[in-house]
Image (spheres, grey):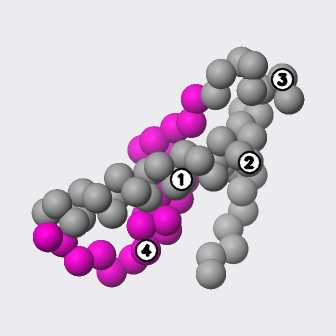
Amino acid sequence: MINIDLKPLLKGGISRYSLVVAVAKRSREIADEAKDEGEILVEKPVSLAVDDFLDERYSIREAEEIKKF
């Protein structure tokens, strides 16, 4: 299990809920793309998705209503 520092991922007031949803969606995309291409993943899709967000290849956008809570 990976224990990473969430502070860089939660910058700008991003909620943990939004982070979890975004990582789950991205990891599903990664798994589906690999399946479609017949590629075997060495790393877990969740780890790859977290790396995508840490490397800022993807970002999280929250609605203003969510940020109020």
Up-down relation of residue 22 to residue 4 (above or below): above
What residue is disc 3 on?
A: 68
What secondary structure is found at the residue carrying circle 2? Answer: helix
Q: Position of residue 52 (x, y in %)?
A: 45, 53
Q: Residues within 10 Å of mark 4 (few under 14, many from 20)?
A: few
Tell me: 21 left or right of 40: right
Residue appearing at x 49%, y 65% in the figure: 46
Residue appearing at x 71%, y 37% in the figure: 14
* Residue 45, visible in the rendered structure: yes
Q: Which mark is residue 16?
A: 2
Q: Position of residue 3 (x, y in %)?
A: 69, 74
Amino acid type indicated by mark 3: Lys
What secondary structure is found at the residue carrying circle 4? Answer: loop
Q: Gap in Å between the C-alphas at discs 3 and 2? A: 14 Å
Q: Gap in Å between the C-alphas at discs 1 and 4? A: 12 Å
Earlier-in-chain disc, 3 versus 2: 2
Amino acid type indicated by mark 2: Arg
Amino acid type indicated by mark 1: Val
What residue is disc 4 on?
A: 44
Q: Position of residue 7 (x, y in %)?
A: 75, 52
What residue is disc 1 on?
A: 23
